[in-house]
Amino acid sequence: MAQPLTDAEREKLRKIIGVMRSATIEGERKAAEEAATRLAAANGMTLEEAEQEAFSEEDDGRLNADERAAQQREAARWAANMVRMTNAYEASEKYRFMMAREEAKRRGLGEQENDTRARRLSGNRPRSYIPGKDDEFRLIAGLLRDGVSLERTAELVGVSTVDVARVWLLTRGKRAA
């Protein structure tokens, strides 16, 4: 006695039959046909009966135009909400940053920052010293050794992540030893 297919079985059968119809490899088509036959037999039907029941709905197993349009509208609504929330969050963060900066200036921290920056730029090293590739290599290796991520290291040093990955690959053998 044939049992009606559950919604899950109907969907599974539709997918299997879709593979069976669209497969370009004979073995794949045959395997899909065998799987569909097993599923039909488990419900007491032949493959043809199961196929008729799986595709018996008026929409032939596909979403009709109204349902598809409703899904697209819902997706567009969701995307618009995400954009609106992201923009609002960015605006609030920018406002917080600007207010904190103004507060720091009001307290006189902006002048201290300029003094600190000037001292840091003058530095202890001779003016003729220009950092080279070896310095960059050591800096990257040190940051990676301290557990800083590839992306953050690249950002801090001012190089690409490919350069950071190259240093990591070159130094990983030295760390194991």
Image (spheres, rainbow, N blue to C red):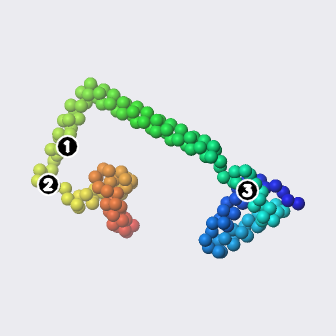
> At 23% from the left edge and 58% from the top edge, which residue is drawn?
135
Report the side of 106 relative to 152 (left or right): left
Report the side of 89 relative to 7 (left or right): left
Where is residue 21 shown, x and y percent of the image? 66, 66
Q: Amino acid at mark 2?
A: Tyr
Front in this rendered view, residue 146 or 41: 41
Q: Nearer the viewer, mark 2 or mark 3?
A: 3
Dot 3 and dot 1 residues touching (CB under 8 Å): no
- Label count reads 3
Q: Which mark is residue 55?
A: 3
Q: CA distance from mark 3 to mark 1?
A: 74 Å
> At 63% from the left edge and 68% from the top edge, which residue is drawn?
23
* First reached walking from the N terminus: tag 1 or tag 2: 1
- Image position of 52 with respect to 72: above or below: below
Residue linked to disc 1: 120
Q: Nearer the viewer, mark 3 or mark 1?
A: 3
Q: Quadrant of the N terminus?
A: bottom right
Residue linked to disc 2: 129
Where is residue 128 shown, x and y percent of the image? 11, 53
